[in-house]
């Protein structure tokens, strides 16, 4: 099982989309400043999580959420909370 997720920086205007097979550990890494691409934007909160059966399916969904329309929907989700 794979997970596609979107996290939002609590302090800055930044949304990160990624995929992993262990979401809880990955979120700990993001908030623990262990991920090079996100360490300057921590701490994070989860705004979206989706399960996928295969890595290929997860990658397709990740690409969608990283697209213009996908990011727009994620901003709407973030701003609604």
Image (tube, rainbow, N blue to C red):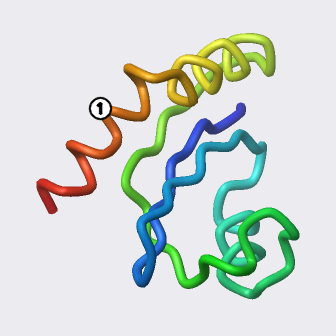
Up the image or down, 81 lies above or below 57; here it is: below
Q: Quadrant of the C terminus?
A: bottom left
- Residue at 59%, 52% in the rendered image: 16
Q: Position of residue 40 (x, y in %)?
A: 70, 80
Residue 37 lies in what quarter of the image? bottom right
**How many numbered badges does the structure rendering display?**
1
Residue 18: give x, y in percent of width and height. Answer: 68, 43
What residue do we see at 60% from left, 44% from top? 17
Q: Which residue is located at x 60 percent, y 36 percent?
A: 4
Neighbour class for label 1 at 10 Å: few (<14), some, many (≥20)?
Answer: few
**Which percent across, then down, holds residue 48?**
40, 46
Q: Is residue 76 left or right of residue 73?
A: left
Q: Would residue 27 be found to the left or right of residue 37 on screen?
A: left
Residue highlighted by disc 1:
73
Q: Looking at this rendering, what residue extends furthest in the left direction?
A: 80
Question: Which residue is located at x 68 percent, y 22 percent?
Answer: 58
Check disc 1 and report its element: helix, strand or loop. helix
Q: Of residues 31 and 40, which is closer to you in this image?
A: 40
Camera-side residue: 40 or 34?
40
Q: Dividing the image into 4 quarters, which one contains the N terminus?
A: top right
| Residue closest to the eye, 9 or 24 | 9
Up-down relation of residue 56 to residue 59 (above or below): above
Residue 50 in the image: above or below residue 52: below
Residue 47 on image: x %, y %: 37, 55
């Amino acid at each position: 099982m794979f997970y596609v997720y979107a996290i939002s920086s609590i302090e800055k205007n930044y949304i990160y989309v990624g995929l992993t097979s262990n979401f809880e550990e990955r979120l700990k890494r993001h908030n623990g400043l262990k991920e090079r691409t996100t360490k300057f934007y921590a701490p994070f909160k989860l705004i979206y999580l989706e399960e996928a059966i295969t890595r290929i399916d997860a990658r397709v969904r990740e690409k969608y959420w990283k697209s213009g329309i996908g990011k727009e929907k994620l901003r709407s989700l973030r701003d609604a909370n």
